[in-house]
Amino acid sequence: MVLQSVKRFLRKHFLRSKPSNSEQSNAKGQHLPPKYTKKTQNPEVLDLDGTPITYKAFPNKEWKQNQCRKWIEEVLVERCEMSRGKARKKAKGFKGYGAGMFAMSSYDWNCPYSDGLGKSGNSIYGLLHPRGF
């Protein structure tokens, strides 16, 4: 008798009556985490404030590697008129994070990896250091 009242109390106060659409429950009535959705091919890379990263965004020193790569890709496409595929390939060569982008010299931007960025590297350096080389 006491056991049944305890179960009722727990069910009433600690278990949800209906799982939401994103939740499921098993045979014992325990809630399970939402199912994983299929990963998108090109997920949106967002800035720290939640807005999409464009070539107009100014890099943040707290950016992670994927955010830096997205900005580099956008700059190469919009400012350097490079194809999206080629820009993405070049941007994937960047290894580092936001603060590291500001620490790189113009020479580093020209040839830090694979075949370098060439004159495009100078463009990126110029955007990061607007007062000059």
Image (cartoon, rainbow, N blue to C red):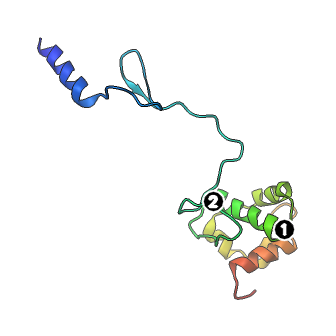
Among all residues in the image, which is located at the extreme left? 2
Q: Secondary structure at mark 1?
A: loop
Closer to us: 108 or 68: 68
Against 132, residue 114 (above or below) is: above
Comparing labels 1 and 2, the label whose residue is closer to the camera: 2
Q: Residues under labels 1 and 2: Cα distance? A: 24 Å
Against 131, residue 54 (above or below) is: above
* Badge 2: residue crowd in 10 Å (few <14, some 14–19, many ≥20): some
Q: Which residue is mark 1?
A: 117
Among all residues in the image, which is located at the extreme top? 1
Residue 84 is labelled as none
Report the residue at 75% width, 63% height from top: 74
Report the residue at 74% width, 61% height from top: 94
Closer to us: 109 or 49: 49
Q: Earlier in the sequence, mark 1 or mark 2?
A: 2
Q: Which residue is mark 2?
A: 52
Three-letter residue code for mark 1: Leu
- Which quadrant is home to the C terminus? bottom right
* Residue 18 coordinates in the image, percent (x, y): 36, 26
Three-letter residue code for mark 2: Pro
Left or right: 111 in relation to 68: right
Q: Secondary structure at mark 2?
A: loop
Q: Quadrant of residue 130?
A: bottom right
Closer to us: 91 or 112: 91
* Residue 71 coordinates in the image, percent (x, y): 70, 64
Q: Are marks 1 and 2 in contact (CB under 8 Å)?
A: no
Report the residue at 76% width, 74% height from top: 124
